[in-house]
């Protein structure tokens, strides 16, 4: 029997701020339980430290420059095959609950069904302008308000959204069991702990403010590298001061919301267990990118430092080895991993519609060593005027942007990335090898030209769509109320029997 797959995604969750990855304060018992019986990947990266580009890479197994998924207003082409397409070819029911930040008229991208709307817009409004890289788009650029306004709240749009995602995902799990709709792949994608940093009281009260650890290293604007200076300017951290109390409140709320997300992991795992599906289900937990959360004086994401670029990745399921993998990997590896999982019963894997940039992580998760130890990253969005590239190989990380000095860090000896080795004489050969590899892998000027061209296209289309009759792409989940619960054309006793789980002994089988 083919195994089921449940992939649970957080938004802006840095693994460093989870108990599952060793944080001494933050409580993530459900992630920790999955890690205890599965594989925890300790060097997993996003391929683009921004929501939509990261998710498009995750879905397609391709780097963003392959598919022009540059920023949060880049269209995800309907012609790009995703893991949902391939799993459908292999007989899976595919379902999406929650955020995926699809931009464009295709809001399914291979999923059979989508049971919630998205939380963010699907049009071109958030298009940056690389010809005016220093110009802020105040309506949607991050700023320091999320830090200054952090605290306790009983309701937010993010809480509304995540409660809806959890409710529909849990109900769908029971539907899979009730109506024997296996094998299935369910993606449940939440928006917490993404800013705004506002937490409900029961999660805020898990932590005492005085116990919340503060950023380990904070640099002033004049101490930053050039790219970090642009980030500080873009989020207004260089012009808007935040107090120690505000920083602590933001981290406090982030920790609380991390525990809230973890509770949703627990709810979904519990539903799988109650539906008698857990033993034959792979459960994977990850995120689209991390959050600097004040480290180095930076906030949010949009850079390749560890707190922004690393993501949690935990995999449990039948045949998964209990342990930790130190091998570098990234979200483009998810597609081949899921296809590999689906093909374990001997089925042939479908022919790929496009080349992919990832490799399957299933052997590593099954305890088989893998010599490959690499992750690649690309950033082509706001607060820069040129592409930024990252290569993580072994313990070294190299970051390149045409207009900035290169950065090279040895994460084994310098996990906080305080010592840039790019100009160090002892590492000159290594730095040159990385620089040569960047030139070989990427045509930076050609990419920049294409980014600017797509930005102009999208801005023109968006401007036109503000006139005349609006045609929204935002996904509206279909519902047929006359077919829900109990209606006059139904036998209510049959409805009661067909929706009850576990079924009564002797009841009619479901199909």
Image: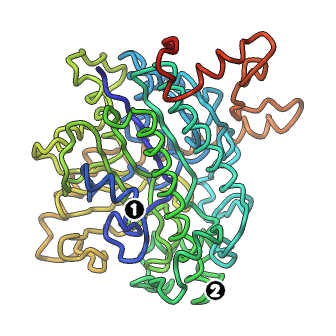
Contact between marks 2 and 1 (CB within 8 A): the answer is no
Label 1 sits on a secondary structure element that is: helix
Q: Relative to 459, is 332 on the left or the right?
A: left
Q: Nearer the viewer, mark 2 or mark 1?
A: 1
The N terminus sits in image quarter? top left
Q: Quarter of the image holding residue 31? A: bottom left
- Up-down: is 264 above or below 427? above
**Mark 1, residue position:** 29
Residue density around tag 1, few if under 14, some if 14–19, many if 20 or more, within 10 Å: some
Q: Residue at x 68, y 73 (%)?
A: 152
Label 2 or label 1, whichever comes before in sequence order:
1
Q: Residue at x 74, y 59 (%)?
A: 139
| Coordinates of residue 189 in the picture (x, y in percent) | 52, 44
**Mark 2, residue position:** 241
Q: Relative to 128, is 264 on the left or the right?
A: left
Label 2 sits on a secondary structure element that is: loop
Q: Quarter of the image holding residue 425? A: bottom left
Q: Relative to 16, is 466 on the left or the right?
A: right
Residue density around tag 2, few if under 14, some if 14–19, many if 20 or more, within 10 Å: few
Residue farthest to the right?
A: 468
Q: CA distance from mark 2 to mark 1?
A: 35 Å
- Up-down: is 220 above or below 507? below
């Amino acid at each position: 029997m083919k195994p089921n797959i449940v992939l649970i995604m957080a938004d802006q969750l840095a693994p460093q701020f989870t108990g599952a990855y060793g944080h001494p304060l933050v409580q993530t018992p459900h992630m920790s339980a999955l890690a205890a019986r599965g594989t925890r990947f300790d060097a997993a990266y996003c391929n683009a430290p921004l929501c939509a580009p990261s998710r498009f890479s995750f879905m397609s197994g391709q780097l963003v420059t392959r598919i022009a998924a540059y920023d949060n207003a880049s269209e995800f082409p309907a012609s790009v095959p995703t893991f949902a397409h391939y799993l459908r070819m292999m007989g899976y029911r595919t379902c999406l609950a929650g955020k995926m930040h699809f931009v464009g008229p295709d809001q399914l991208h291979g999923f059979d069904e989508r049971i919630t709307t998205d939380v963010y817009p699907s049009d071109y409004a958030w298009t940056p302008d690389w010809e005016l890289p220093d110009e802020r788009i105040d309506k949607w650029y991050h700023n320091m308000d999320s830090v200054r306004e952090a605290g306790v709240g009983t309701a937010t749009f993010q809480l509304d959204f995540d409660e809806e995602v959890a409710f529909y995902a849990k109900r769908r799990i029971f539907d899979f069991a009730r109506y024997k709709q296996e094998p299935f792949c369910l993606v449940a994608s939440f928006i917490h702990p993404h800013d705004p940093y506002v937490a409900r009281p029961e999660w805020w009260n898990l932590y005492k403010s005085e116990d919340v650890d503060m950023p380990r290293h904070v640099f002033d604007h004049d101490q930053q590298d050039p790219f970090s200076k642009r980030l500080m300017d873009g989020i207004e951290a260089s012009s808007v001061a935040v107090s120690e109390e505000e920083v602590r409140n933001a981290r406090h709320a982030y920790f609380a919301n991390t525990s809230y997300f973890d509770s949703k992991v627990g709810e979904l795992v519990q539903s799988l267990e109650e539906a008698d599906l857990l033993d034959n289900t792979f459960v994977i937990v990850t995120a689209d990118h991390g959050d600097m959360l004040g480290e180095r004086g930076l906030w949010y994401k949009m850079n390749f430092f560890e707190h922004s670029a690393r993501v949690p990745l935990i995999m449990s399921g039948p045949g998964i080895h209990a342990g930790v993998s130190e091998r570098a990997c990234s979200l483009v590896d998810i597609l081949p991993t899921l296809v590999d999982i689906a093909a374990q019963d001997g089925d042939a894997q479908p022919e790929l519609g496009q080349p992919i940039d990832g490799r399957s992580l299933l052997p590593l998760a099954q305890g088989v060593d893998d010599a490959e130890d690499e992750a690649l990253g690309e950033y082509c969005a706001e607060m820069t005027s040129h592409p930024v590239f990252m290569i993580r190989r072994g313990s070294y990380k190299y970051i390149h942007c045409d207009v900035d000095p290169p950065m090279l860090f040895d994460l084994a000896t310098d996990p906080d990335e305080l010592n840039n080795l790019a100009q160090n004489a002892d590492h000159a050969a290594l730095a040159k090898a990385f620089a040569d590899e960047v030139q070989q892998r990427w045509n930076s000027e050609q990419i920049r030209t294409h980014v600017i061209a797509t930005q102009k296209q999208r801005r023109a289309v968006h401007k036109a769509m503000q006139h005349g009759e609006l045609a929204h792409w935002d996904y509206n989940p279909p519902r047929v109320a006359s077919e829900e619960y109990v209606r006059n054309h139904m036998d209510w006793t049959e409805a009661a029997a067909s929706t009850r789980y576990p079924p009564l002994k002797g009841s009619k089988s479901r199909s």
